[in-house]
Amino acid sequence: MSAAKHALLLTLLVAIFAAALIYFFIKVPLVPIAASAQAAPIDTLFVVLFAIASVFFSLAFVTLVYNVIAFRAKPGDTEDGPGIKGHNLLEATWTLIPLVVVMVLAVLGAAVLGDITRASPQEMEVKVVAAQWSWQFEYPEFGVSASELHLPVNRPVLFKLNAVDVIHSFWVPEFRVKQDAVPGMETVLRITPSREGSYTLLCAELCGLLHAYMTAPVSVEGEKDFLSWVQKQKGGQ
Ligand SMILES: [Cu+2]
């Protein structure tokens, strides 16, 4: 087979393998249900990153396997292959393409970050206190506090995170975004819950013996249900 035919066949195989991988990342749900306005841009970026990685992985992996099979040494052949030195076009190509890819990803990443951290005028503030090993939520707007997190659907929330002992991390996988709670400083996190339901808040920073049990129930509900929960909290005090 001529060199051109090998190149054509290899290109075709790389393209097929990359397409199959990209199809897999688009079709197979690898992340939980999306339950916040921040989830969509993050999930899209995730697929874009995996699509690009699929192309480069296929290029390296399929080329390796193809060469091992197509250019295997004949039995008894102990000679070295031809030494090839310096190929300016090739070197410029493998420098420029990754440079462009990384720059595009940086711009995309910055756009998504700007998108998911943007402040909104009608934000509800929730103060979160993380401790070994519990979560506490304060609602300054309503004057209540609780050990479970209730949020009205579709209202932007500004979380102000504090830790009393060691570093913890506020993470609800369905909301996608995550933020550390650090002793001695207040960190913020913005989430707009977009889907009613029950979720679990996890601590995503190894924080001691009971780290794995540092969870809190999260309930995203309609405005009316949320306000009646607030009233109940007030009544209980
Ligand atoms: Cu923790």
Image: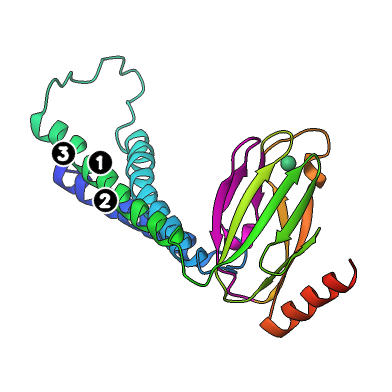
Q: Secondary structure at mark 1?
A: helix
Q: Residue 98: which disc? A: 1
Q: Look at the numbered disc 1 and say if its residue's Cβ is closer than 8 Å to ligand 1.
A: no
The residue nearer to you, when weighing 123 against 171, is: 123
Residue 61, placed above or below residue 148: above
Residue most toward the right?
236
**Which is more N-terminal, label 2 or label 3?**
3
**Residue 23, x across and y down, in percent:** 44, 63
Q: Which mark is residue 104?
A: 2
> Callout 2, which amino acid?
Val
Q: Residue furthest left?
A: 88
- Which residue is identified by label 3? 93
Q: Position of residue 31 (x, y in %)?
A: 58, 59
Point 66% across, 68% down: residue = 141
Q: Is residue 94 left or right of residue 203?
A: left
Q: Is the residue under label 2 in contact with that under label 3 (CB below 8 Å)? A: no
Q: Which residues are magenta?
A: 168-195
Mark 2: few, some, or many residues within 10 Å (few <14, many ≥20)?
Answer: few
| Residue at (26, 51) in percent of width and height | 104
Residue placed most toward the observer, 27 or 236: 236
Q: Locate the C terminus and report the quarter of the image it occupies.
A: bottom right
Q: Position of residue 202 (x, y in %)?
A: 71, 51
User: Element under label 2?
Assistant: helix
Ligand 1 contact, mark 2 (Cβ < 8 Å): no
Q: Quadrant of residue 166?
A: top right
For the N terminus, give its image quadrant: top left
